[in-house]
Image (cartoon, rainbow, N blue to C red):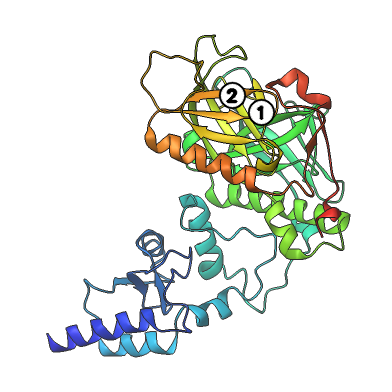
Amino acid sequence: MMDRDRNKTLLLELQRAAGTGNGCCADCGEPDPEWASYKLGIFICLNCSGIHRNLPQISRVKSLRLDFWENDLIEFMKKHGNLCAKAKYEAKVPPYYYIPQSCDCLVLKEQWIRAKYEREEFVATRVCQDPCSAGSREGFLWKRGREGRQFQKRRFLLSAREGLMKYYTKESRGPKAIISIETLNAMFQTEKIHHAHGLQITYNTDGQTRNLFVYHESGKEIVDWFNAIRAARYHYLRTTFPTVPELELIPRITRKYVKEGYMEKTGPKQKEAFKVRWFCLDSQERNLMYFKNPLDAFAQGQVFIGKRDEGYEVRAGLPQAVRVKKRKPAITVVTPVREFVFICENDREQREWIDALAGVMAQPLTGHRHRKGGNREMSTRECRCSEASVPLQNLA
């Protein structure tokens, strides 16, 4: 019993020790990990420990507090630790490769862990692929039909060298869509697509944002596709804007929406009936888009979110002239030319939407899209010529 208590105390001290990196999960960065792999000598969180359990030839896990730790295992943990493992297993992580965080979906974390420890893809002896090569890929993905709900197998072709992504419906015909890597984006949407490997691909076509929803049965395959898209995007940004520092390029490779969810909206007269719509806030494009259904190919409309010092504001509650029967929390988005009124599902959603919108309003407009003229609700048909791009090199 004395050894058990002593070793537990030693482990917890080692987890908190400065300069070891042990205070956060070695794989996803979650603070205060309470599990450890005694085969790799790393401290990990509960969620990542579940992934490690599926790699018994590579890793063996124990709880810092609940399991008994033998003296030799304590000594092994002392000699290793998270920073030591990082130096070995993350020696050559490419700049475009997505390193998951604790909030990311399971498939991203699982494939990151397998890539590091099982396949040893990033050890110092590995030769790294250049972004142009890594950003080239061909294969089949299950794609959701634009009109129907069924997923069908489609051939996708990604070429960083050509700066294009294409997909085909029939082998005998040309590509169904030719997508410029300049506007290409990808994000995992496992809950939205209702598949553990669900990926949302977006791009601009005729001034509108087009959504593609895809998946693959293999977790490795879909994550490889995601990182290939990131490699192609990185190649495009690096060659197009060679003087921009890498730290400014990395966040622009791909992005998630700041906030998504259902709200109710009314029309421009604020007397129309409120209708439930799915909203997505894109902080980089500064657009609040809304859809009839979450998996629609195109938005029904969008609202540009400018800066606070240019007359944009988000408030809790309704404008004085608006009356609604439902006693639900509301928000009002104020623009220079009109007010947009939305009803949220609950108080928590109201706070999250207010914080997300206020965060976008606080962002500088430099290096972004500027709207010509005043702001109003834009249908997808009206979005084609409404914005002008500012080059990325103006960010410096």
Q: Nearer the viewer, residue 71 or 206?
A: 206
Task: Assign a secondary structure to mark 2.
Answer: strand
| Label 1 packing within 10 angstroms: few (<14), some (14-19), many (20+) | some
Query: On the picture, is 44 further left or further right than 210?
Result: left
- What residue type is disc 1 on? Val
Q: Which mark is residue 303?
A: 1
Picture residue at 58% right of the left edge, 18% below the top: 148
Above or below: residue 258 compared with residue 61: above
| Label 2 packing within 10 angstroms: few (<14), some (14-19), many (20+) | many
Q: Which mark is residue 340?
A: 2
Return the x and y of residue 366 as percentages of the image width and height.
Answer: 78, 49
Above or below: residue 201 compared with residue 239: above
Q: Nearer the viewer, residue 25 or 121?
A: 25
- What residue type is disc 2 on? Phe
Return the x and y of residue 329 as percentages of the image width and height.
Answer: 41, 28
Q: For residue 56, which quarter of the picture?
A: bottom left
